[in-house]
Amino acid sequence: MFSRHALMLAATVVALAGCGGGSTTASAPAATTAAAAAPSSSAAAGLSIADPWVKTVKKGMTAAFGTLVNNGDTDVTIVSGTSPLSPTIELHEVVESGGKMVMRPKEGGFVVPARGTHELQPGGDHIMLMGVTEEVKPGAKVPFTLQVKGGQPLEFSAVGKDFAGGEEDYQPGHE
């Protein structure tokens, strides 16, 4: 018998895996080096991202993940993002609503605590790209700019990686 917690965790993974689009390759994302994810020098003081990656997709929607790292002495809030890959980017979270896990825009953005981290991962917070303008293949470098509330933007490139998750296909208009 599965516990309620185990079922919720499974539902979370299934719910977000569809966020990334239609790839069905079953390999898990491999870690990238910090050098490949080096932020620009204009990033908010002490803010960087480790192991950024984007789920491969032919068209439609996908998501970006990684670990936001704040080496500064004050909290940092990410309020929006841009990428030439997508005309619309939203900061998303996955939460329980009505007994099921749903994806929705993250109110107030992502807060990265002082001297702490904030995970962007399947089944949790992530950067959602809608209306992707070109195919994302394994190994592709996708540029991003994250806007920091009251600070300079964080610029980085994320690597395209195959990730199947629960192998669902995200359909626009469905949560």
Image: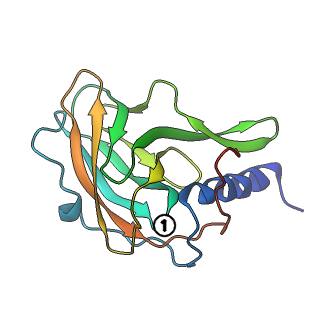
Please tell me in which quadrant of the rendered image residue 7 appears: bottom right
Please tell me in which quadrant of the rendered image residue 154 appears: top left
Residue 29 located left or right of residue 46:
right
Of the 4 image quadrants, the one containing the C terminus is top right
Counting from the top left corner in percent of width and height, residue 147 is at 28, 33
Provide the residue designation for mark 1: 57
Amino acid bearing label 1: Val
The residue tagged with tag 1: helix, strand or loop?
loop
Above or below, comparing residue 164 to residue 175 in the picture? below
Counting from the top left corner in percent of width and height, residue 77 is at 35, 28
Q: Which residue is drawn at 81% across and 35% down?
A: 98
Dot 1 crowding, Cα within 10 Å, few <14, some 14–19, many 20+: many
Of the 4 image quadrants, the one containing the N terminus is bottom right
Q: Residue at x 32, y 74 (%)?
A: 139
Q: Residue at x 50, y 73 (%)?
A: 28
Above or below, comparing residue 28 to residue 119 in the picture? below
Counting from the top left corner in percent of width and height, residue 54 is at 41, 61
Q: Which residue lies furthest to the right in this view?
A: 1
Q: How did the renderer colour the structure?
A: rainbow
Residue 94 located left or right of residue 6:
left
Q: 9 or 104, which lies in front? A: 104
Above or below, comparing residue 120 to residue 147 in the picture? below
Q: 150 or 72, which lies in front? A: 150
Residue 15 located left or right of residue 124:
right
